[in-house]
Structures are given as C-alpha cells and as structure tokens.
Amino acid sequence: MKRLWLLFAQTVTVLLAVWFVVRTLQPQWLQRPGGVISVVQAPAAAAPARAVPGSLSGAVRKAAPAVVSINTSTRQPAGGDPWLRFFFGDSGGPQQQSGLGSGVIVSPEGYVLTNNHVIEGADQIEVTLPDARRAAAKLIGADPDSDLAVLKINLDRLPVMTLGDSSALQVGDPVLAIGNPFGVGQTVTSGIVSALGRDQLGINTFENFIQTDAAINPGNSGGALIDINGNLLGINTAIYSRSGGSMGIGFAIPVSTARQVLESIVQNGRVVRGWIGIEPNELTPELAQTFGVRASAGVIVTGVLNNGPAAAAGIRPGDVITQINGQPVRTVRELLTRIAALAPGTSAPFTLDRRGQSVQLAVTPAQRPRPPAHAR
C-alpha cells in the first residue's frame, strides 16, 4: 500500500513539472500557426503643454485654416478643322480648361485674396477650405497692375487670417509659405526673407516683392507667406525657375500692398490710383549728361505726355523728381508707388531739381487708366 502511494505521488510530481514547463516556456511546437498574440500597447502620449523648442506648429495651426485651394474652369471657344467637327461632333466644340491656385480668407464676410493670374478669364471659381467645405466664389474685382484679385464666398464660421506688418520685415527673418502646390493638398514650407523691395522683374506694373527661399511651386500662387506668429506677411505670387519647380527664389506681394488693393476693390469695385503721365527713368550718369542734370539723387523724367497732368503742372523732360508730398523719391519704384497713392483730382506738392535749381510744383493727378485686357 505504501508503495502505491509513493508511485502515485511521483506520477503527480512529474505531471505538475510537465505542466509548469508548457505553461511557462510555451515551446514553439505547441503554438498554433496564425494564433492571436497578446501585446502591450504603450499609452498614447499626452499633448505637450508647450510646443517643442523651435517648432513653428503654433503659427501653422493659427494660419493654415484660412488658406484655401482655388479651382477654376474656363470654357475655351470652339476650334479646329470644321470637317473634323462635322465627323466627330463635340470633339471640335468648346473645351473646358481647369486651373489651380491658392487663396487667403482675410475677413469674416468671406473676402478671399489671391493672384489675378490664378482667376483671370475663369468662368467658374470654386474655393475649398482645409475642413473640406466648398463654395462657389464670386469675383469682386481684380487688379492686373499688382496681380491681385478679391473673391467672396458665402459660408458660416469662416477662419480668418490675421494681417501682419510687412514694413517691419528684415532680411533673415524666418517665414512660412502655405498653399496647395501641384494640387497635392495643403503644404507648409519654411525659409527666410532673402531680400526686400525686389522690382524690375517684369511680373507686375507695381513691383515691391518680398523674396524668400521658402519653397513655392505651381499651385502656391495666391497662398500665404506668414511670420512665426501666424500673421500674414504677403501673397505668394511667382518663382524664378528653370525647371518649373522651386529653386529657392520665390516672390510674394507685401501685405501692405494687398490690404490697399483689398480695401479699394471692396469699396470701389476696382483699384483707384493716381497718374500724371510721365516716362520716368533711374538717374544714371549717361542720362544726367544727356539732359545736363546736376542732381545726384531722384528720378529723371525722360518724357511727358501732352495734355497730361504732369504737362499741365509744368513738369518738363530733364526734370528730376526728388520728393512727392514731402516724401523722398529715390527709385522709379518709389515714384510709381507714391504717385499711385495720390488721390485723383487732389493737388499734391512735387519737388524737382531743374538744372541745379529746386522747383516746387503742385500737380493734380488723374485716375490711372485701365491697362489693356491682355496686360498683367
């Protein structure tokens, strides 16, 4: 009897040992193929109380909701061979051409700033917000001279971009560009202010660009250039490129110019600018010698339109304009900007250098004529 109890105890001990090994080590030959494996998931990281040092995510969160995608549709006239249209029907009829760009919501009323070249000639304009809402846009007005346009959409609870101060910008300041390049979706790129006051690029009549190395590509036109606080500094407009893509040279219209255009279009339906009818040129030693000019600074007048405001006020070829309304004039860009800012029909004081003599004239500007429809 005692031997049976001993054998029973040994058998139970062996079985418990085998059970312990299987339970603890789980040999591979006992595992089922395709079985469920339990894993321990790390808890989700809590949102940081403050942004990562150096991160510009706060600026993006503030500004990005107000940067929209703009899709345009233009109906092209019928073309092609009439025999092809006869045999193939609609293939020779009017065609739809689509376009893509970006824009910035700048008021709760639904006004959107973009480039004129984004919407020029479009029959239909649709705006898409980052929250996926869409709305047909109405063209309020366009200004080819600055390559800006104002649209309006009717949606509730619109995000609005805060306007910054482009006059306080300095070369080297960090900036972000937000837009919809190549239609891939809203994209943010970063860079610095590379230069200020870029002109003579042949893009617009009134050029005073912010140059940046933040990547700007096709589809970014009309989008936002912002500072590190998420405030609007400019409207991205053009790039210098040999390939069609970004090469680190992009240009934006300063928000100071964009705001003037916006307010004028909303109030008047168009931009009202002063105009005096002269042909200005930078004062070079060659021109100074040709006209017998002694002045070393200012903008020389090389032509005056007959019966124009400048001619009526007594401005002559060879005069050097040095001040307008008490503000210095050093370049053609400054001259055009100061004249454009004058109210048509209101006299303004001009200071000229005429063969070494300072001359004061009162000039009453007219309204700047509209550019030809094909001009930009």
Image: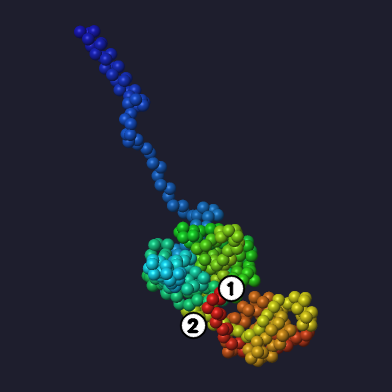
Residue 272: percent from left, percent from top: 54, 82
| Amino acid on which the number 1 mark rests in the picture | Asn
In depth, the one of 57 and 96 nearer the eye is 96
Q: Find residue 250 and name its label.
A: none
In depth, the one of 42 and 150 nearer the eye is 150
Image quadrant in which the N terminus is located: top left
| Amino acid on which the number 2 mark rests in the picture | Asn
From the image, state whether disc 1 or disc 2 is nearer to you.
1
* Disc 1: which residue: 204
Query: Image height check: is 297 above or below 72?
Result: below
Image quadrant in which the C terminus is located: bottom right
* Disc 2: which residue: 268
Residue 53: percent from left, percent from top: 54, 53
Quadrant of the image occupied by residue 355: bottom right
Q: Residue at x 42, y 64 (%)?
A: 129
| Disc 2 residue crowd, few under 14, some 14–19, many 20+, Cα 10 Å | few
- Is residue 364 visible to the viewer in this orientation of the structure? yes
Q: Which of marks 1 and 2 is nearer the N terminus?
A: 1
Query: In the rendered view, how is the structure colored?
Result: rainbow
